[in-house]
C-alpha cells in the first residue's frame, strides 16, 4: 500500500513529483492547493474563504483544510493509496490525520521530504506559471510552455498566480519556516521521514525518490 505524504517548502517540487508518482503507482494525487483553486474558480463559499488566505501567502486554517482532505480520502479512488501533496502543513493537521487514519485501521507509509536552498525556492516560485484551464504547471526557466502564455496540453491561458510574485513568495517561505518545519521532527520521531534532495530536474529528483519507496 502506498499512502504517501510529500513534504517540503513551496517551490520544492512536491506537485511535480506527485504527478510522476500518480502515473507510476496508479493512485490519486490529493493536493489541497488544487482543491482550493477549483473551489475559487467555481466561486464556492470554501473558495472565497481560501482565496483570502492564499493571496496573502498565509496558510488556510487547520480545521477547514483537514475537513476537506478527510472528505477526499473517503472517495473510492483513494482506497488503494494516495499521494498527499501539501498536506499536512502543521502539527495539528498531522495529528488529526494520524487519528482519523488510525480509526480507519490505516496509516501513512512514507513521508518524503524534498529539501532545497531558499535561493532555489525563490527562483522556482517566481518563475512558475499555471494553466487556468487544466491546472498544468510550467516554469519559465526549467519547463516553459512551447508557446508563451499558451498551455501545451489544452491550449488554455498560462499565467502567473497572484501567490507566485516575489513579495508573496517571501511571505510563503516565512510562514512555512514557522508553521511547517516542526513537522520534520514530528515525522522523524514517528520513524516515517525520508529526506530527498529536491534540486535538479524532475527526472533527477524522481531517481532519488524511487529507492525510498522501494525500501
Image (cartoon, rainbow, N blue to C red):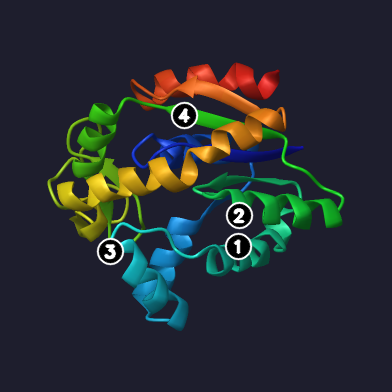
Tell me residue 175's x, y (percent): 36, 49
Residue at image mark 3: 55
Q: Residues within 10 Å of mark 1 (few under 14, many from 20)?
A: many
- Check whether the beta carbons of the residues at disc 4 and disc 1 lie within 8 A of each other: no
Badge 4 marks a residue whose secondary structure is strand
The span from disc 3 to disc 1 (Cα, nearest Å) is 20 Å
Q: Quadrant of the N terminus?
A: top right
User: Hey, which quadrant is residue 123 in on the image?
Assistant: top left
Horizontal side of residue 145 vs 19, given as left or right = left
How many angstroms separate mark 2 from mark 1 (CA)? 6 Å
Q: Which residue is mark 1?
A: 66
The residue labelled by disc 2 is 93
Q: CA distance from mark 3 to mark 2?
A: 21 Å
Mark 4 or 1, nearer chain start: 1
Residue pointed to by mark 4 = 114
Q: Earlier in the sequence, mark 3 or mark 1?
A: 3
Q: In the figure, is residue 48 to the left or right of 24?
A: left
Q: Which of the two residues, 35 or 137, is positioned nearer the viewer here?
A: 35
Question: Which quadrant of the figure contains the C terminus?
Answer: top right
Amino acid at each position: 500500500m502506498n499512502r504517501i505524504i510529500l513534504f517540503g517548502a513551496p517551490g520544492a517540487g512536491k506537485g511535480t513529483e506527485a504527478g510522476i508518482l500518480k502515473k507510476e503507482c496508479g493512485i490519486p494525487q490529493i493536493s489541497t492547493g488544487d482543491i482550493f483553486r477549483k473551489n475559487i474558480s467555481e466561486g464556492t463559499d470554501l473558495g472565497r474563504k481560501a482565496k483570502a488566505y492564499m493571496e496573502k501567502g498565509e496558510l488556510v486554517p487547520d480545521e477547514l483544510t483537514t475537513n476537506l482532505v478527510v472528505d477526499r480520502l473517503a472517495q473510492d479512488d483513494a482506497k488503494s493509496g494516495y499521494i498527499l501533496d501539501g498536506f499536512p502543513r502543521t502539527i495539528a493537521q498531522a495529528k488529526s490525520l494520524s487519528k482519523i487514519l488510525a480509526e480507519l485501521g490505516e496509516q501513512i507509509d512514507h513521508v518524503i521530504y524534498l529539501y532545497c536552498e531558499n535561493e532555489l525556492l525563490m527562483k522556482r516560485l517566481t518563475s512558475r506559471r499555471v494553466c487556468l484551464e487544466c491546472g498544468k504547471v510550467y516554469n519559465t526557466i526549467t519547463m516553459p510552455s512551447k508557446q508563451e502564455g499558451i498551455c501545451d496540453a489544452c491550449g488554455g491561458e498560462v499565467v502567473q498566480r497572484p501567490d507566485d510574485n516575489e513579495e508573496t513568495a517571501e511571505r510563503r517561505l516565512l510562514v512555512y519556516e514557522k508553521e511547517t518545519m516542526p513537522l520534520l521532527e514530528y515525522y522523524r520521531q514517528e520513524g516515517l521521514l525520508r529526506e530527498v534532495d529536491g534540486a535538479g530536474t524532475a527526472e533527477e529528483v524522481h531517481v532519488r525518490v524511487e529507492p525510498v519507496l522501494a525500501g
